[in-house]
């Protein structure tokens, strides 16, 4: 029961991240006013942030079983979530100047912060203490 509940909440969180990511990408694409390489910049930033965010979410959720594993999973998820966009920013500054000039750095930052805020809210809402409190409220609800 616990495993299926965890798998369900992991899938729900992943779908939520995808939904927020899709909305953010749609907004970014709608801001195209004919700038050169804008769509490429959006694709670069969106792909980078999606890999980091979903990778971090799944890694963190995979290790929820015990407290010591949860700490290790949180650290591994944080590493994935942060290092992939940071490596992309470093690449933009050294070799990807054509995308950097098109605004990929700003897009990367905006998408990263949007997905990070979503990830934080998901972790708060899906924490074991919150889930237990919701179950208690549901059981005590009058018929």
Image (cartoon, helix red, strand yellow):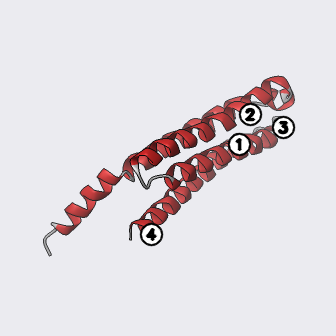
Query: How many residues crowd around disc 1 within 10 Å: few (fewer than 14), some, or many (20 or more)?
Result: many
Query: How many residues crowd around disc 2 within 10 Å: few (fewer than 14), some, or many (20 or more)?
Result: some
- Give the spatial CA distance, label 3 vs label 1: 16 Å
Query: Which of disc 1 and disc 2 is earlier in sequence?
Result: 1
At 66% from the left and 42% from the top, the residue drawn is 49
Tell me the quadrant of the picture where the N terminus can be found.
Answer: bottom left
The nearer-to-camera label among 4 and 2 is 4
Tell me the quadrant of the picture where the C terminus can be found.
Answer: bottom left
Residue 125 appears left or right of 116: left
Q: Which mark is residue 48?
A: 1
Determine which residue is flagged by label 2: 88
Query: Which of disc 4 and disc 1 is earlier in sequence?
Result: 4
The nearer-to-camera label among 4 and 3 is 4
Determine which residue is flagged by label 4: 4
| Label pair 2/1, CB-CB below 8 angstroms | yes
Determine which residue is flagged by label 3: 37
Query: Which of disc 1 and disc 3 is earlier in sequence?
Result: 3
At 55% from the left and 59% from the top, the residue drawn is 15
Query: Which of disc 2 and disc 4 is earlier in sequence?
Result: 4
């Amino acid at each position: 029961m616990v495993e299926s509940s965890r798998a369900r909440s992991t899938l729900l969180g992943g779908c939520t991240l995808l939904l927020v990511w899709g909305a953010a990408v749609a907004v970014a694409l709608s801001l195209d006013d004919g700038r050169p390489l804008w769509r490429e910049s959006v694709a670069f930033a969106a792909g980078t942030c999606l890999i980091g965010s979903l990778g971090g979410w799944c890694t963190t959720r995979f290790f929820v079983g015990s407290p010591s594993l949860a700490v290790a999973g949180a650290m591994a998820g944080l590493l994935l979530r942060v290092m992939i966009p940071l490596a992309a920013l470093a690449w933009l500054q050294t070799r990807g100047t054509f995308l950097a000039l098109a605004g990929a750095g700003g897009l990367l930052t905006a998408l990263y912060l949007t997905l990070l805020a979503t990830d934080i809210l998901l972790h708060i809402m899906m924490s074991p203490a919150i889930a237990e409190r919701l179950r208690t409220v549901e059981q005590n609800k009058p018929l």
